[in-house]
Image (cartoon, rainbow, N blue to C red):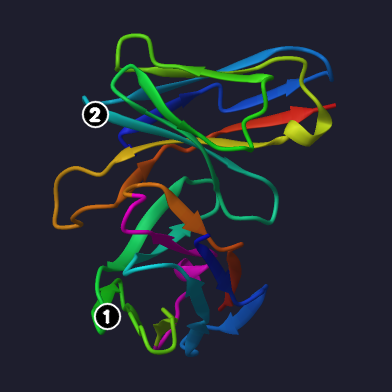
Amino acid sequence: DTGVSQNPRHKITKRGQNVTFRCDPISEHNRLYWYRQTLGQGPEFLTYFQNEAQLEKSRLLSDRFSAERPKGSFSTLEIQRTEQGDSAMYLCAVPHTGGSSGANVLTFGAGSRLTVL
Amino acid sequence: GDSVTQMEGPVTLSEEAFLTINCTYTATGYPSLFWYVQYPGEGLQLLLKATKADDKGSNKGFEATYRKETTSFHLEKGSVQVSDSAVYFCALSGVANDYKLSFGAGTTVTVRA
């Protein structure tokens, strides 16, 4: 149990279709982050929320991407008119709590893998 | 901007061999440095971290020392096991960026029995 649940775990779609991913942190967190990981690369920051407010968006987040966190708990990431280049693992993360890890540590979900045919 | 460069893989080792994965970084100020690990079929997990120069992070037999003079954070383990087979990512968090991490490309490590 990573503390962050992501659904669906794997989505296969045809080019041009819309897809939506959901992230559910198990406990309350003010901040929530989305990252994208393409094959053979490390995760890249996409966007983050402070409660309901989306405070920063990477230039990687084109206007086909929209993320929301309506109640400051779960979050959704929607991709409209998918392209093959959108194929990647989409990761959700929240600040780590408990233990002695300290600041700046993120707890990641297992991710949602998108395959665009 | 902030960036991380880590040793390319894949790396294949025999059990009980010594493992080193090189990581260097570019950042302004004094970033926090991390190693994350991704085991097959699992999500990213923090392996160890260091928040200031000369700090040594350690966990599960792995160690890495924050070297400001060489802007490096190399990961080492003296005797690897098959269960250490995974992808290892070096990452940093700049002072101003809080939890926004910059990751290296990852190094795939395979340990053979």
Could you say where residue A8 lies in the image, as x and y percent from the top left? 56, 21
The answer to whether residue B63 is magenta is no
The amino acid marked with disc number 1 is Ala
Quadrant assignment, res A25? top left
Q: Residues within 10 Å of mark 1 (few under 14, many from 20)?
A: some
Circles 1 and 2 on the same chain: no
Residue at 73% from the left image edge and 32% from the top image edge: A86
Residue at 41% from the left image edge and 86% from the top image edge: B79
* Residue B92 drawn above or below residue A96: below
Circle 2 chain = A
Tell which of B111 and A66 is nearer to you. Answer: A66
Horizontal side, residue A69 vs residue A30: left or right: right
Quadrant assignment, res A101? bottom left
| SS under mark 2 | loop
Q: Which mark is residue B53?
A: 1
Which region is colored magenta?
A: B78-97
Horizontal side, residue A41 vs residue B35: left or right: right
* Residue B64 drawn above or below residue A104: below
Circle 1 chain = B
